[in-house]
Amino acid sequence: MFLDTNILIYSISTIPEEARKRERAIALLDSDECVLSVQVLQEFYVQATRASRADPLPHEIAVEMIRTWLRFRVQENNLAVLEAALEIKAAHRFSYWDSAILAAARISGCRTVYSEDLSHGQQVAGLRIINPFR
């Protein structure tokens, strides 16, 4: 199961209204079956540490969290991901970045992508999209 960036972000949320999402995200991250990509880890760092965030993480804590998640399989950003992302973008008109997430998931052998940002239940490029917060 491939996890999109929003799963990682919700796992660190301190916003009371997001408590249910935080619990669900943490439960997903407890699985040994998680797959991430370098892009997801990069996006997590940028979003988690941005100054405009209500509760930004210090650099050191964000880095330590990323190191913890390296226990999962991590799909590298490479030419195969780029080419697959461009094909997915052309076929489905997603943003490039969403297409790259889907491409990384497909190349890493996943069948399911957990994301709040894509349409729940949609089938794309052999992948099933699941919004775990529904």
Image (cartoon, rainbow, N blue to C red):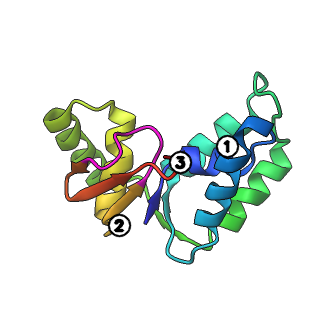
Which quadrant of the rendered structure holds the N terminus? bottom left
Residue carrying label 1: 45
Q: SS of the residue at dot 2?
A: loop
Q: In the shown orientation, is residue 123 left or right of residue 76?
A: left
What residue is rendered at 29% in x and 56% in y?
Answer: 128
Q: Position of residue 59 (x, y in %)?
A: 81, 44
Quadrant hosting residue 119: top left
What residue is rendered at 29% in x and 45% in y?
Answer: 82
CB contact under 8 Å: marks 1 and 2: no
**Where does the magenta region start and end?**
114-122
Q: CA distance from mark 1 to mark 2?
A: 22 Å
Local packing at callout 3 (Cα closer than 10 Å; few below 14, some 14-19, many 20+) is: some
Q: In the shown orientation, is residue 130 left or right of residue 54?
A: left
Q: Position of residue 37 (x, y in %)?
A: 48, 56
What residue is rendered at 35% in x and 66% in y?
Answer: 108
Asked if the magenta segment contains residue 119, the reply would be yes
Q: Position of residue 99 (x, y in %)?
A: 31, 41
Q: Position of residue 55 (x, y in %)?
A: 83, 34
Residue carrying label 2: 108
Residue carrying label 3: 133
Amino acid type, mark 2: Ser
